[in-house]
Image (cartoon, rainbow, N blue to C red):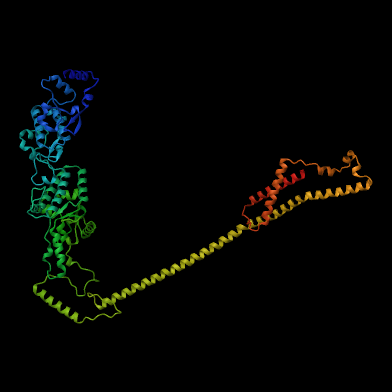
């Protein structure tokens, strides 16, 4: 083994195979009979040094007994951690994070070794690079966090809502070395520095979730994930919200405008403005009105539930005219600035969230309409604002069309006046029942809350409306008929104009067709005259033959052609007879001309004889070109015939 180590050390020194190359070589690590992994050589630790710290969460190399120092130096050059150094401990922390170690005692032992190695009083200024790496390797119960995501001390009220871990709670039992490591080595502030705005937004969301669960459980039942019971959480919800808003205002004071925009966006996207439940003032209203009992019950139940609002649904204060109305109960200034005394509440709600400072009646109506258009999910919270949060339902006046004739605004009455009113109402009911008569079949039945005069007036208005609708339908039908008639006349006029233009355009074409017909007849006459030339020649030849025979008979009546010698026989033969017996010589051009002439004549005859042929429309230039071409072919045929 010594020879192998010396060879590796020699190669590392020569640079042919550097320590980076050899340290990156994979090494097969078998955890059990089936599972096997490949780990780089430089990710191993010396067993004798690091096993007491990392336990089963690190990968080790064991050296045999009696190994010299050169072997350890060779492994150190390859990247194996053989000494207890800051770099080795930082690398051990990274390997613990990669192997998902969840044992806080392992991390505590590593942190204690780092605290012991660093002599705080002497070498605190030489750990800048290692300090930055160690700040990102803080272990808490939720996993590895950065130092900025933790605090040393614990805020007694809202720390559990922000989900920010307190390191003092986790590592205080491991003694002063751990406290010195976090406070002196990592320079963590001992006093609580306050929460970031994002953590406080998370606290508000968690408070909404826990209150939702608490309202659906028994008050004495403890809530999972909280240090209180359901009843205690509901009772302290107002104080917790005030503390969160106060801490958020202080955090926004210290942070930049970017954090202000993030906070405002969070309150726009979710209902994070929390208002505690209130006792409904409708409990002191008129209890004798049976129609308002259900409305009082529903409004009182809604008023007792805590409310959460969007930033666009809330207001800081109301105008003086609305100071005595129910809208003043939803103002944030009397609650968070007056009762709870939240520091910088006006800065948070007006400057950061952008709430309206004073709302008028029109502004509240606009916010009510926007809130009713966005009801939100079904929950135990009172989502948004409702009409019952602003007005009493029994005091809202309805329209005169649906109002009974004897309707009046309900007032607070004594017991005697209530009994008097009940006796009067009973007498009216009995008299109305005795005087009731069924309406005739032809007239509509008036509603019970309207008089006969109002019903007749409503019937007259309905008849007038129907008459107006009939007039409108008649006007629409008349206008539609007139429009159709105008369109029909316009279409007829267009058709006549189109026919006239077509006749004018077809007149030259008809003249051209007549001219072509005349030309066609002329060509037929010329062809017939050409065809009669051979017949005239034959007639002339016959006349010559007759004349020759007469001459022979008159000159030599006693002589016979058979008595002549052959020489005289050929000498007395007529020229036309010799020409008739001699075969004529015809060239190929003459033969093709004759065939073309016959074909042209046959086509021309068929076109003249067929009665169904319709003349085609053509332009004057095309007709003249066809005529010139036809005449040229006829002239060529005549030249060929004369040449024969």
- Residue 314, position as x, y percentages in the image: 19, 55
Residue drawn at x 90%, y 49% is 550
Relative to 533, residue 177 above or below = above
How far from the left and from the top, in percent, is residue 625?
Answer: 66, 48
Is 117 drawn above or below residue 69 in the view shown? below
Q: Quadrant of residue 560?
A: top right
State left or right for residue 392 relative to residue 642. left
Asked if residue 340 shows in the view, the reply is no
Q: Tell me the quarter of the image containing the C terminus.
A: top right
Q: Return the residue found at the far front.
A: 562
Q: How many marks?
A: 0
Figure quadrant of the N terminus: top left
Q: Nearer the viewer, residue 459 or 15?
A: 15
Can residue 226 be seen here? The reply is yes
Query: Residue 45 sits in which quadrant?
Result: top left
Residue sitting nearer the eye, 277 or 250: 277
The image position of residue 540, as x and y in percent, is: 83, 49
Question: For the view shown, which residue lies furthest in the right direction?
Answer: 558
Residue 82 vertical position relative to residue 271 in the rendered view, above or below: above
Q: Locate residue 230, reporting x and y percent.
A: 9, 53
**Residue at 16% from the left image edge and 26% from the top image edge:** 80
Residues 94 and 613: in front is 613
């Amino acid at each position: 083994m010594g020879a192998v180590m010396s060879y590796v050390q020699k190669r590392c020194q020569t640079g042919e195979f550097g320590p980076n190359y050899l340290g990156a070589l994979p090494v097969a690590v078998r955890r059990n009979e089936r599972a096997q992994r490949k780990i780089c050589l430089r990710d191993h630790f010396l067993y004798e040094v690091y096993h007491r710290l990392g336990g089963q969460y690190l990968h080790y190399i064991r050296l045999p007994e009696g190994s010299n120092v050169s072997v350890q130096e060779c492994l150190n050059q390859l990247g194996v951690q053989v000494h207890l150094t800051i770099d080795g401990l930082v690398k051990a922390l990274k390997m613990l994070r990669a192997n998902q170690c969840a044992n806080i005692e392992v991390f505590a032992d590593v942190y204690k070794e780092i605290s012991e190695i660093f002599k705080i009083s002497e070498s605190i200024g030489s750990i800048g690079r290692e300090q930055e790496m160690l700040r990102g390797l803080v272990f808490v119960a939720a996993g590895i966090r950065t130092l900025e995501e933790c605090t040393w001390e614990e805020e007694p009220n809202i720390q559990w809502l922000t989900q920010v871990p307190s390191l003092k709670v986790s590592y205080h039992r491991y003694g002063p070395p751990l406290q010195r490591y976090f406070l002196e080595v990592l320079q963590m502030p001992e006093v609580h520095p306050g929460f970031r705005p994002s953590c406080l937004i998370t606290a508000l969301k968690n408070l909404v979730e826990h209150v939702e669960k608490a309202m659906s459980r028994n008050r004495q039942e403890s809530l999972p994930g909280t240090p209180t019971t359901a009843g205690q959480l509901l009772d302290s919800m107002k104080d917790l919200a005030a503390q969160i808003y106060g801490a958020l205002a202080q955090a926004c004071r210290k942070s930049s405008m970017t954090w202000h925009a993030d906070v405002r966006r969070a309150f726009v996207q979710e209902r994070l403005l929390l208002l505690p439940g209130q006792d409904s003032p409708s409990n002191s209203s008129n209890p004798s009105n049976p129609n308002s009992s259900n409305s009082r019950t529903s409004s009182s139940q809604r008023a007792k539930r805590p409310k959460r609002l969007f930033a666009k649904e809330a207001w800081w204060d109301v105008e003086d005219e609305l100071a005595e109305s129910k809208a003043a109960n939803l103002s944030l200034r009397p609650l968070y600035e007056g009762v709870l005394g939240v520091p910088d509440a006006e800065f948070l709600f007006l400057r950061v969230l952008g709430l309206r400072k004073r709302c008028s009646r029109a502004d509240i109506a606009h916010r009510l309409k926007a809130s009713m258009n966005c009801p939100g999910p079904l929950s135990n919270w009172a989502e948004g604002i409702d009409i019952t949060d602003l007005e009493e339902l029994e005091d809202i006046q309805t329209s005169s069309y649906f109002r009974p004739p004897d309707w009046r605004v309900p007032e607070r009455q004594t017991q005697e006046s209530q009994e008097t009113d009940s006796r009067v109402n009973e007498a009216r009911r009995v008299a109305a029942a005795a005087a009731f008569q069924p309406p005739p079949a032809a007239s509509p039945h008036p509603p019970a809350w309207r008089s006969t005069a109002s019903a007749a007036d409503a019937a007259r208005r309905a008849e007038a409306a129907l008459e107006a609708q009939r007039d409108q339908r008649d006007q629409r039908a008349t206008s539609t008929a007139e429009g159709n008639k105008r369109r029909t006349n316009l279409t007829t006029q267009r058709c006549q104009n189109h026919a006239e233009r077509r006749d004018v355009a077809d007149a030259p074409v008809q003249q051209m067709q007549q001219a072509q017909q005349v030309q066609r007849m002329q060509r037929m006459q010329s062809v017939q005259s050409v065809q009669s030339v051979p017949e005239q020649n034959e007639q002339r030849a016959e006349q010559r033959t007759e004349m020759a025979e007469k001459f022979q008979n008159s000159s030599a009546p006693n002589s016979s052609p058979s008595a002549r010698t052959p020489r005289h026989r050929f000498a007395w033969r007529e020229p036309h007879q010799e020409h008739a017996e001699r075969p004529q010589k015809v060239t190929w051009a003459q033969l093709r001309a004759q065939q073309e002439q016959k074909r042209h004549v046959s086509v021309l005859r068929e076109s003249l004889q067929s009665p169904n042929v319709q003349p085609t429309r053509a332009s004057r230039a095309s007709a003249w070109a066809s005529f010139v071409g036809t005449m040229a072919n006829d002239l060529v045929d005549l030249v060929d015939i004369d040449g024969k």
